[in-house]
Image (cartoon, rainbow, N blue to C red):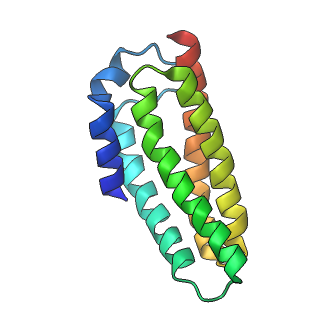
Amino acid sequence: MELLGSLSSAFAGNIKLKYNILNLPPLSPPDYIFGIVWPILYFLIAIAGYLIIFSNRAPNRVKTASSILFWLQLFLNFIWSIVFFNEHYIWGLIIILILDIVVFLCIVFFRRINRLASNLLVPYLIWILFATYLTIGVAMLN
């Protein structure tokens, strides 16, 4: 998971530099906070994904839908920083709004298979909802 974040950052360019020159909304954290939060979230996402993908306790339909949602949220997470940090703020906003919905659906579907997997995604949802606020702010201010 951490590799996915690093790869996305590589495609997005110098994120730290780009972040520091943006006009940011109130409550924007310093750039080093992201380097602390994201590895923790990627770890939680990886555990949740493992618990779902390798679960034998769910009907195939539920497991298939959960797996599709899991991979979709990873893809959306991956492309968001590439799009956003290449100054496509409105497209970044659209992507993160879809990501919010998909992660919420992951939490709902995962709960039917494994409550722990579902709960592990709650901090991720909270963080990306905050990131949605930041994205809206950046789109309006830049």
Residue 23 lies in quadrant: top left
- Viewport quadrant of the N terminus: bottom left
Q: Is residue 51 above or below residue 12?
A: below
Image coordinates of residue 69 in percent, x first then y, are: 61, 60
**Number of numbered tags placed on the structure image:** 0
Q: Is residue 110 above or below residue 84?
A: below
Q: Is residue 44 left or right of residue 1?
A: right
Residue at position x 43%, y 19% in the image: 87
Residue at position x 70%, y 72% in the image: 111
Image coordinates of residue 30 in percent, x first then y, are: 38, 29
Image coordinates of residue 3 in percent, x first then y, are: 30, 55
Image coordinates of residue 98 in percent, x first then y, are: 64, 41
Residue at position x 41%, y 16% in the image: 22
For this orientation, the residue located farthest to the bottom is 56
Q: Can residue 134 be seen? A: no
Q: Is residue 128 above or below residue 142?
A: below
Q: Is residue 43 left or right of residue 103?
A: left
Q: Is residue 78 left or right of residue 118?
A: left
Q: Nearer the viewer, residue 34 or 18?
A: 18
Q: Can residue 95 be seen? A: yes
Q: Is residue 16 above or below residue 21?
A: below
Q: Nearer the viewer, residue 39 or 94?
A: 94
